[in-house]
Image (tube, rainbow, N blue to C red):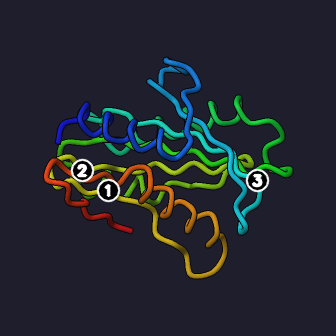
Amino acid sequence: MDHSRYHDAVVAKRREHGFDVVDEWTNGFDPVWAARDEDPTVGDVHLLATVVDGTDYGPSAVVETADDFRELLLERVVNPGGSTTPIGYVVVTVPAPDEALVERATSYTVAKRRTNVFPLVYDRAARRLHTHSIPRLKGRGIYRRQVDDAERLFDVPDVDGRSRSRSP
């Protein structure tokens, strides 16, 4: 699946789940979607999400993109760390990511500066979404939320209607 077909499939899912377009072009991200939610585990949640074409990305580009998205999340969320839990998702679509890129994305420091940013990798060749694993102890709620959100928003059926595999 190419980037634009994946992007379009995610756009359709974001509409189903109440994500609205923030702007057509926000700090270099095209587009950014936002939603608010009340989560019994993590409280009032402010979500931002985007899909990025990572065709020429290496591990450091994934980190830079996630860091840039964190800055955007900080600009958009009022009172981060107070009564609001800001969560950002940056899905980087890559034709066939190497293990170093996937490892760097899924080991990225999620919680920083009172925000939570999850860089996720979508392997376009294998049609597989790579998410962060759920830790055994501390922070399980945020990571569990990430897996659930990834499944409902970013794990889309392929052309034949089958769901792609997802890796923790």
The residue lying at 51 percent from left, 45 percent from top is: 89
Q: Quadrant of residue 47?
A: top right
Residue 11 placement, left or right of 79: left
The residue lying at 24 percent from left, 50 percent from top is: 123
Q: Position of residue 156 (x, y in %)?
A: 31, 51
Q: Position of residue 38 (x, y in %)?
A: 72, 56
The residue lying at 55 percent from left, 75 percent from top is: 135
Q: CA distance from mark 1 to mark 3?
A: 26 Å
Q: Nearer the viewer, mark 3 or mark 2?
A: 3
Q: Nearer the viewer, residue 160 or 45?
A: 160
- Give the mark, 3 or 2, whose residue is nearer the N terminus: 3
- Give the mark, 2 or 1, whose residue is nearer the N terminus: 2
Q: CA distance from mark 3 to mark 2?
A: 31 Å
Q: Amino acid at mark 3?
A: Asp
Q: Nearer the viewer, residue 81 or 103?
A: 81
**Tags 2 and 1 in contact by the CB under 8 Å rule?**
yes
- Above or below — where is 51 with respect to 82? above
Q: Position of residue 148 (x, y in %)?
A: 50, 63
Q: Position of residue 144 (x, y in %)?
A: 55, 68
What residue sits right under mark 3 in the picture? 44
What residue sits right under mark 2 in the picture? 123
Q: Amino acid at mark 2?
A: Asp
Q: Nearer the viewer, residue 119 or 76?
A: 76
Looking at the image, the residue that sits furthest to the bottom is 136
Classify mark 1: residues with Cα within 10 Å, few (<14), some (14-19) or many (20+).
many
Residue 162 placement, left or right of 81: left
Mark 2, secondary structure of its residue: strand
Q: Which mark is residue 129?
A: 1
